[in-house]
Image: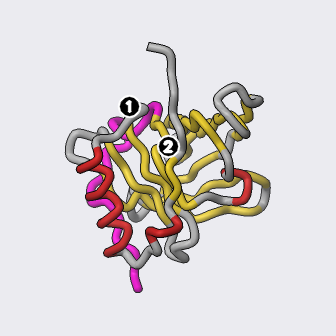
Amino acid sequence: MQMRVAEELDLTRFMGEWYVIANIPTAFEKNIYNAVESYRQTDGDKIATRFRYRKGGFDGPEKAMNPTGKVSEDNNAVWSMQFIWPFKAEYLVMHISPDYQHTIIGRTKRDYAWLMSREPEMDDEVYRRMEQILSEAGYDVTRLQKVPQRWPE
């Protein structure tokens, strides 16, 4: 089944910080807290990315990864992420809310997914709608795990 991606993604508006509210985690994302993904456009089609989180609890050690994203020439919502050269991972912006406050990132294999928000909390109704979008795209949403977020006021 073909994966639908966001139409007409405005990269400038998409840049900045996104709190990871829930995910179908990769191996290194299990038992993470305060996960935040940050994007900054660099040379043309390149995206400097910083993924930071705490491992094991809110007071756990802070970890960070800095992959480089490359935007497809055909569609701004289709990226590849390079964590370790020469390996690249598919990265699809499946959904973006009209106000650019919520997004869903996925992969054609439907093995991983990320629900993200500009704020560390997400309204239950918005969460359910995003979960529904994933389900309609063929994801097993029972694998979705919430990522605890707690930040000082």
Q: Residue furthest top?
A: 153
Q: Amino acid at mark 2?
A: Val
The answer to whether 90 appears left or right of 117 in the picture is: right
Residue 9 on the magenta span: yes
Residue 38 on the magenta span: no
What residue sits right under mark 1 in the picture?
A: 119
- x%, y% of residue 68? 64, 46
Q: Is residue 90 above or below residue 108?
A: above
Q: CA distance from mark 2 to mark 1?
A: 9 Å
The answer to whether 82 appears left or right of 19 in the picture is: right
Which region of the structure is painted magenta? 1-17
What residue sits right under mark 2 in the picture?
A: 20
- x%, y% of residue 4? 34, 71
- x%, y% of residue 62? 72, 29
Residue at point 31%, 66% (across, down): 133
Q: Secondary structure at mark 2?
A: strand
Q: Who is closer to the viewer here, 112 or 124?
A: 124
State which quarter of the image contains the N terminus. bottom left
Q: Amino acid at mark 1?
A: Glu
The answer to whether 45 appears left or right of 83 in the picture is: left
Q: Who is closer to the viewer here, 70 or 128?
A: 128
